[in-house]
Image (cartoon, grey):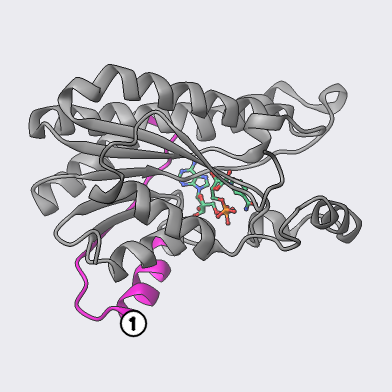
Amino acid sequence: MDLQGKVAVITGASRGIGFAIAEAFLANGAKIAICSSGEEGVNKAKELLLSKYPGADIFTAAADVSKREDCERFINGAAEHFGKIDILVNNAGITRDTLVMRMSEEDWDAVLNVNLKGAFLMSKAAVKLMVKQRSGCIINMSSVVGQSGNAAQANYSASKAGVIGLTKSLAKEFASRNIRANAIAPGFVKTEMTEVLKEDIKKTVLESIPLKRFAEVSDIANAAVFLASDNAGYITGQVLAVNGGLYI
Ligand SMILES: NC(=O)c1ccc[n+]([C@@H]2O[C@H](COP(=O)([O-])OP(=O)(O)OC[C@H]3O[C@@H](n4cnc5c(N)ncnc54)[C@H](O)[C@@H]3O)[C@@H](O)[C@H]2O)c1
């Protein structure tokens, strides 16, 4: 129970990696606040989590992380409900994959707004409280392609590289207030985001992964539990790659 008594806010937790992190945090004793852009998704997630952890204290909200008002409403609502926020996981993310020659300005803006601006807006709202508490932990979801780049993912790769810069800057800016900031850079994880990829692409990716398997969502959730715990108390400004050796 590495997170006993801690309060964690997780964005994009209606499914996939975010949901797995929510589940792992509950299993480790945390109280959680979860959001996703749609009300229905986040309510279903809460129901499912409650069926596994009856009586768990779960705060939910529909919040679009690319909108400042939504971020502030969600963070302040969670803080009012629980009295504090110890951990923020900026997990919400989208893809709009296509080659640069075909990529519209809208494709670029949409991905940057959710993946990068969303992490900034949520972090800004949360650190206001964490600074007063003189403690906090931020975990930002980057990606292997933020480190390596990827054809047909210029917008996504740029957003995930930006998340690394944001993480390192947060770490430097708030270390004196006992706030840590780290990023996780997953490789290829089995979720609905990657389910849409064509079989031949999946096969090529699989062949290039030294551990010869895609990540389970639990592989990423385990890394998040570690970074959020006091066991990682001396780790800040780092990018934890969870990629099966895909990018070393
Ligand atoms: N799946 C992978 O292989 C992989 C690899 C590297 C990084 N990641 C990153 O991990 C994170 C989660 O990925 P996933 O595969 O679970 O994705 P997913 O598509 O399964 O889930 C994304 C979640 O984000 C939420 N979301 C989307 N837009 C939002 C918005 N504007 N405001 C609030 N919530 C929003 C969705 O409702 C959903 O809950 C993302 O940041 C993604 O970029 C995923």
Image quarter hosting the C terminus = top right
Q: Nearer the viewer, residue 19 or 45?
A: 19
Res 69 seen here: no
Residue 34, percent from left and from top: 33, 55
- Residue at 12 percent across and 53 percent down: it is 82
Looking at the rendering, the stretch of residues picked out in magenta corresponds to 42-67
Taking 238 as reference, is 151 left or right? right
Specify whether residue 45 is painted magenta. Answer: yes
Image quarter hosting the N terminus = bottom left
Taking 24 as reference, is 103 left or right? right
- Residue at 54 percent across and 37 percent down: it is 142
224 up-or-down from 53: above or below: above
Specify whether residue 110 is painted magenta. Answer: no
Taking 20 as reference, is 85 left or right? left
Tell whether circle 1 marks a residue whose Cβ is less than 8 angstroms from ligand 1.
no
Residue at the outermost right position: 200
Res 187 seen here: yes
The kind of residue tagged 1 is Ser
Residue 230, percent from left and from top: 23, 48
Mark 1 lies on residue? 51
Question: Disc 1 on helix, strand or loop?
Answer: helix
The image quadrant of residue 185 is top right
- Residue at 68 percent across and 52 percent down: it is 188
